[in-house]
Image (cartoon, rainbow, N blue to C red):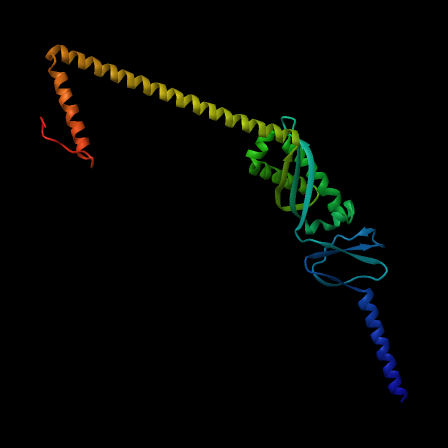
């Protein structure tokens, strides 16, 4: 009986030790994350980066710090000025992630909230520097070019902080109400100018047509005068006969017209 109790107590002790080890000597790094260790005896953050899985640590001496390395979306708003001194509100959407091998350095220099410290700062800096090189109208007409240039500058600045940008895009772009009203007024003025241009062009075409028609009628009258001078009244008689034929053809197609023999 005593032997059985001794075995049970030993087993319970072993389970307690195992539980203590599991709770204090092991830690897990989940998928999409990496781990670093803070060691009190060796002066802070250790240089090693722990991959996904279960890892050992020294209880009460080392403390695990788990950091996500997944691509994370972030929206960066900014109000800045254009080359022609127009105020623009712009929002930038970025997909970012830290450089895995540099996690100890990032944590040591910037802390756990490094994204909050870095992203708004470099986002506003890049937006102000790039937007200032374009006029307000160019931001609209060359939006893809502006977005691509902002992306290049963001990636270049991110290298200084060991941050990678998988995607950078402009999601929101608008101007102050005064500028919007000025654009609308300009569009209306351009439409009115195009309309007046069309009216003037149409009037000019009608004038040219009238001139050509008058010149044709004058040429016809000149030719008729010359023909009369050359052949006397005969040409007029021929025209009278042709006109009578045309009238007769028109009347012949009428249903209510009756021809009577001449003299009756």
Query: Residue 197: x and y, percent?
Result: 45, 23
Left or right: 52 with respect to 16? left
Q: Is residue 150 above or below residue 225?
A: below
Nearer to the camera, 262 or 130: 262
Residue 199, how many percent across, how many down?
A: 43, 23
* Nearest to the observer: residue 255 or residue 26: 255
Q: Quadrant of residue 209?
A: top left
Residue for point 69% across, 35% down: 79
Task: Report the residue that reaches farthest toward the front.
Answer: 264
Q: Tell me the quarter of the image containing the C terminus.
A: top left
Q: In x, y percent, where is residue 10? A: 86, 79
Q: Is residue 32 above or below residue 129?
A: below
**238 relative position to 145: left or right:** left
Looking at the image, residue 227 sits to the left or right of residue 174; the answer is left
* Image quarter of residue 37: bottom right
Query: What count of labels does the image hold?
Result: 0
- Residue most extreme to the bottom: 1
Q: Give the residue drawn at x 36%, y 21%.
A: 206
Farthest top residue in view: 229
| Image position, residue 232 (x, y; %) | 11, 12
Q: Is residue 150 above or below residue 238?
A: below
What residue is at 14 percent from the left and 10 percent from the top?
Answer: 229
* Residue pictured at 75% horizontal, 45% vertical: 116
Question: Considering only vertical position in the picture, is 209 above or below 165?
Answer: above
View extreme (right): residue: 2
Give the position of the N terminus as an image quadrant.
Answer: bottom right
């Amino acid at each position: 009986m005593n032997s059985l109790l001794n075995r049970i107590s030993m087993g319970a002790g072993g389970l307690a030790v195992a539980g203590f080890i599991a709770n204090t000597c092991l830690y897990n790094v989940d998928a999409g994350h990496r781990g670093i260790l803070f060691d009190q005896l060796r002066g802070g953050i250790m240089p090693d980066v722990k991959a996904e899985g279960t890892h050992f640590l020294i209880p009460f001496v080392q403390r695990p710090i788990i950091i996500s390395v997944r691509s994370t979306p972030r929206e960066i708003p900014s109000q800045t000025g254009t080359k022609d001194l127009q105020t623009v509100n712009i929002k930038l959407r970025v997909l970012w992630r830290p450089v895995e091998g540099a996690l100890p350095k990032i944590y040591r220099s910037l802390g756990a909230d490094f994204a909050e410290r870095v992203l708004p700062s470099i986002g506003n800096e890049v937006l102000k520097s790039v937007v200032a090189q374009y006029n307000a109208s160019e931001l609209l007409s060359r939006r893809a070019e502006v977005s691509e240039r902002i992306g290049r500058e963001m990636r270049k600045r991110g290298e200084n902080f060991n941050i990678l940008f998988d995607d950078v895009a402009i999601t929101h772009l608008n101007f102050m109400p005064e500028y919007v009203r000025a654009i609308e007024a300009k569009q209306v003025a351009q439409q009115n100018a195009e309309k007046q241009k069309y009216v003037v062009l149409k009037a000019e075409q009608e004038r040219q047509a009238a001139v050509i028609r008058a010149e044709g009628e004058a040429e016809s009258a000149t030719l008729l005068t010359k023909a009369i001078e050359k052949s006397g009244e005969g040409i007029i008689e021929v025209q009278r006969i042709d006109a009578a034929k045309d009238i007769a053809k028109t009347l012949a197609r009428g249903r209510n017209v009756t021809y009577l023999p001449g003299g009756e």
